[in-house]
Image (tube, rainbow, N blue to C red):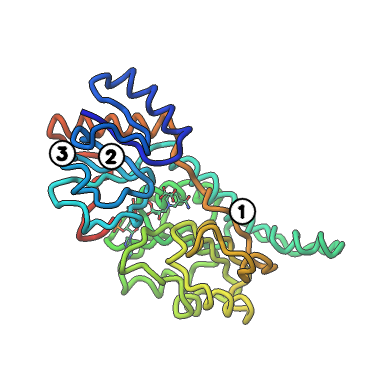
Amino acid sequence: MSFLYKSEPVRGARWAELFAARAPDIDFHIWPSIGDPAKVRYLAAWQPPENIAETFPNLELVFSIGAGVDQFDLSQIPAHIPVVRMIEPGLVAGMVEYATLAVLAAHRDWLTYAVQQREERWQPMPVRTAGTRRIGVLGMGTMGQAVLDKLRDFGFPCAGWSRTEHRLPGIECFAGEQGLGDFLARSDILVCLLPLTPETRGILSRKLFLQLPPGAVLINLGRGDHLNEDDLLDALDGDHLSAAMLDVCSIEPLPEGHPFWQHPRIMLTPHIASVTQPDTSAEAVLDNIRRHREGLPMVGLVDRVRGY
Ligand code: NDP
Ligand code: OXD
């Protein structure tokens, strides 16, 4: 029986060591070395190989290397094979760090100061307290809840939006289409931590921006396809939004000459808000293999109907 890993090779080498120590009955292969495809029971991938069902006839479980599963065409994976996304503490911790950094940078006007520095301009702006800056997080899942938990401690009035109702201490919770307008109207800094699904694709649009308070800041940490890029440029250039911080783009890497590169009010990072950490993620995968073998519920099982 074998495990096929198809993602970043340095992490793969560490997983191989940990599997050898913790699950010696499983042969570990790092793509493109796949061994005998009929022996592959477990596949973990960031970008999945093509024709999974035909190539690996005895596959039992598919793992996403990331928290998102939008890179998988779930219709191509036979219904009896569970798909499990990544839930591991290292990935959550990285996201909490990045989201906190981005929110604090927006709150303390760092993009404006970066521009002023290049212009050799010494121009203080009023310093607002955290209590006067309202944060809204789209998505209250593993990432969104951890981020809200941290931001609340700074004294920001925090709210979250999700598909179903949630309750979190000290967080104003909104849900569904009917809760979106009120949630947006009170969000000075909007953080997107949604999964990419047919319902959420393009959600960061002109219509949504116009419901935010004037001067709001957008931080997109979900997926590039959540965002309508032209609508963002219009909202920034029309001064409805004051800045955007984008860790994800529709096309990655962002193409040469794209208007985002040079926009003075856009801060870009190359999809590094958080990264699956080798040791903790291997633990999470090994634990789910154990759960699967023992017939227990797996952590991060994807609901194919919801698409996340
Ligand atoms: P979860 O599945 O745990 O949470 C998803 C949240 O989004 C849930 O609260 C869910 O609502 C909500 N949601 C889904 N669809 C809708 C909808 N149609 N309307 C309203 N709310 C909706 O995911 P994670 O928190 O683990 O991850 C979220 C995303 O973050 C990933 O899918 C990925 O795209 C992104 N990510 C980006 C990284 C980066 O480096 N940039 C790193 C890691 C993740 P409900 O609770 O009601 O189900
Ligand atoms: C993820 C990501 O989904 O890194 O984990 O984007």
Badge 2: residue crowd in 10 Å (few <14, some 14–19, many ≥20): many
Residue type at numbered disc 3: Asn
Tag shown at residue 74: none
Residue at image x 31%, y 68%? 198
On whether ligand 2 comes within 8 Å of the CB at mark 3, the answer is: no
Kindly report which numbered mark, 1 or 2, lies closer to the viewer in this rendering: 2
Q: Where is residue 169 in the image (x, y as percent from the top left)?
A: 38, 50
Q: Quadrant of residue 65?
A: top left
Q: Residue beneath label 2, please?
A: 43
Kindly report which numbered mark, 1 or 3, lies closer to the viewer in this rendering: 3
> Which residue is more in the foreground, 115 or 146?
115
Dot 3 falls on a residue whose secondary structure is: loop
Tag shown at residue 104: 1
Dot 2 falls on a residue whose secondary structure is: strand
| Quarter that holds the N terminus | top left
Q: Is residue 10 above or below residue 119?
A: above
Q: Is residue 268 left or right of residue 41?
A: right
Dot 1 falls on a residue whose secondary structure is: helix
Q: Position of residue 133 (x, y in %)?
A: 57, 62
> Which residue is more in the foreground, 39 or 270?
39
Tag shown at residue 58: 3
Q: Where is residue 157 in the image (x, y as percent from the top left)?
A: 50, 59
Quarter of the rendered image showing ligand 1: bottom left
The tag earlier along the polypeptide, 1 or 2, is: 2
Residue type at numbered disc 1: Leu
> Which residue is more in the foreground, 168 or 64?
64
Badge 1: residue crowd in 10 Å (few <14, some 14–19, many ≥20): some
Residue type at numbered disc 2: Leu
Q: Quadrant of residue 42?
A: top left
